[in-house]
């Protein structure tokens, strides 16, 4: 899909006053999802290095490897969203299994905080998601990523991109 088509779709969404996209857009819409993946679990799974499934995440996921989800600053998420990401996915080690003890707990609170900020500003908080998957749960991680990709496709393009930069 060309950028023009995406932009045209965003304008169409603006005309009806919505921020969640239109069903007609989901036919051709190819989401851009930024995935902050913990190095110790979901990143290696996404790379296909571990996990029995060896099933890659959808191509819409632009992977950013982080040492721990605790490293994901709220500004990383907000910046990704404002620069046009249609969704932001954060995945890390299961609670109690973080290699830095509490990084994933911090990440969970930060994502909740950013969702609250989005809701306060009238932005679509459903475009943010945090989930857990170990390095041996390749199939489960693929399911998480595929389901999030499907959800974002239903929501359509991130209209904020158009509002901020056009
Ligand atoms: Fe994986 Fe902290 S090391 S979430």
Image (cartoon, rainbow, N blue to C red):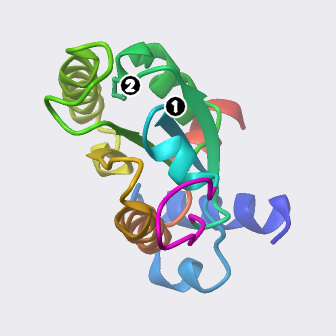
Which residue bears the numbered disc 1?
39
Q: Please name the residue shown 78% across and 69% down the image.
A: 5
Specify few, some or many for label 1: CA neighbours under 10 Å numbering under 14, 14-19, or 20 or more: many
Looking at the rendering, the stretch of residues picked out in magenta corresponds to: 48-57
Left or right: 73 with respect to 9? left
Question: Which quadrant would the N terminus be assigned to in this image?
Answer: bottom right
The C terminus: image quadrant: top right
Q: What element carries label 1?
A: loop
State the image coordinates of residue 97 (x, y, percent, origin top left): 22, 30
- Res. 69 mark: 2
The answer to whether residue 21 shows anywhere in this view is no
Say few, some or many: other residues with alpha carbon within 10 Å of mark 2 (under 14 / 14 to 19 / 20 or more): many
The answer to whether the beta carbon of the residue marked 1 is less than 8 Å from any atom of ligand 1 is yes
Q: Could you give the CA–CA distance between mark 1 and mark 2, rounded to whole angstroms? A: 9 Å
Q: Is mark 2 within 8 Å of ligand 1?
A: yes
Q: Disc 2 on helix, strand or loop?
A: helix
Q: Residue 131, which numbered label?
A: none
Question: For residue 100, what is the image quadrant?
Answer: top left
Q: Nearer the viewer, residue 144 or 47?
A: 47
105 with respect to 29 (left or right): left
Q: Residue at x 40, y 63 (%)?
A: 148
Look at 58% across and 78% down and name the residue there. Answer: 25
1 or 2: mark nearer the eye: 1
């Amino acid at each position: 899909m060309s950028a023009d088509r995406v932009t045209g779709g965003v304008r169409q969404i603006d005309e009806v006053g919505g921020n969640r996209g239109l069903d007609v857009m989901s036919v051709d819409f190819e989401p851009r999802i930024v995935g902050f993946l913990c190095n110790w679990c979901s990143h290696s799974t996404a790379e296909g290095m571990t996990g029995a499934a060896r099933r890659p995440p959808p191509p819409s996921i632009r992977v950013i490897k982080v040492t721990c989800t605790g490293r994901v600053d709220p500004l990383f998420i907000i910046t990704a969203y404002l620069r046009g990401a249609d969704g932001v996915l954060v995945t890390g080690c299961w609670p109690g299994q973080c290699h830095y003890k509490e990084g994933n707990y911090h990440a969970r609170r930060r994502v909740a905080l950013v969702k609250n900020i989005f809701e306060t500003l009238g932005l679509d908080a459903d475009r943010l998601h945090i989930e857990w998957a170990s390095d041996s749960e390749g199939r489960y991680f693929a399911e998480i990523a595929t389901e999030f990709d499907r959800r974002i496709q239903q929501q359509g393009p991130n209209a904020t991109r158009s509002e901020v930069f056009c």
